[in-house]
Image (cartoon, grey):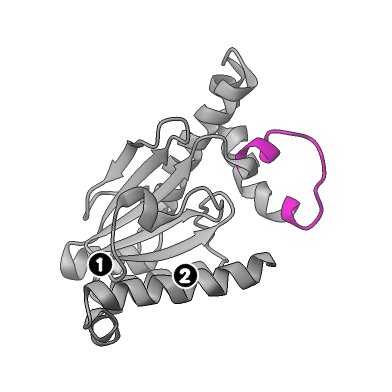
Amino acid sequence: MKPFEKILKDNKTWAAQQLATDPTYFKRLIEIQSPEVLWIGCSDSRVPADKITGTQPGEIFVHRNVANLVVHTDLNLLSVLQYAVDVLKVKHIIVCGHHNCGGVRAALSNQSLGLIDKWLWNIKNVYRQYKKEINAQSSEDAKVDLLTELNVKEQVLNLAKTSIVQKSWKENNAPDLHGWVYDLRDGIINPVFDIPAGSKVDEIFEYDNL
């Protein structure tokens, strides 16, 4: 059986199991989507948001990309962010990185990997900002771990710089912003950075006319 065929087979099994335990399961999903959390995570197949948080469909709104970046020219990310904030009225936004992230590790190298170089440029800028602190680490793995945490912090700060978030802060005093790192070695999520709703950002990024 080919991998995609197994996925389709397993899907039918899963759907049947859901109906057997709860006949109204899918009907409820159709009618309701009111998550209180937007999750911005990494595309890595080892870090599925629902599995590592134990949440059910409908509980978190999810966006994933390589190395969980918040890039101000990424219309996909910004569209998800605006929908989550303006329509779903989420109370929290979580940026979750993870241990041994391939994107972060690649950004620490000088090897060109093709088109993804343009994306990893954003992480390289985080490294440039904290180069002394990162280079002081005793091993390559430790450098990757620290850059992962610092990258999460910078992406949370990038969220706070958006007009979408600032407008919602002024109107709704939400959402709170959180930076987490998931450790593949033990399955535990570790909070590393928070910005409560309404916090001050660098004045050059504040919008007075919102």
Q: In terms of secondary structure, where does tag 1 sit?
A: loop
Q: Residue 152, position in %: x, y?
A: 45, 43
Q: Amino acid at mark 1?
A: Val
Of all residues, the one furthest to the left in this rendering is: 172
54 sits left or right of 117 in the view: left
**Residue 78: mark in rendering:** 2
Q: In terms of secondary structure, where does tag 2 sit?
A: helix
**Residue 24: mark in rendering:** none
Residue 24 within the magenta-colored segment of the rendering: no
91 sits left or right of 48 in the view: left
Q: Give, as a single range, the part of the protein colored magenta.
A: 104-117
Q: Quadrant of residue 186?
A: top left
Q: Quadrant of residue 175?
A: bottom left
Which callout, 2 or 1, points at the residue further toward the start of the chain?
A: 2
- Which residue is found at the position 21% from the left and 66% from the top? 170
**Residue 90: mark in rendering:** 1
Location of the N terminus (image quadrant): bottom right
Of all residues, the one furthest to the top in this rendering is: 138
Q: Nearer the viewer, residue 200 or 39?
A: 39
| Image height of 207 relative to 24, above or below | above
Q: Amino acid at mark 2?
A: Leu
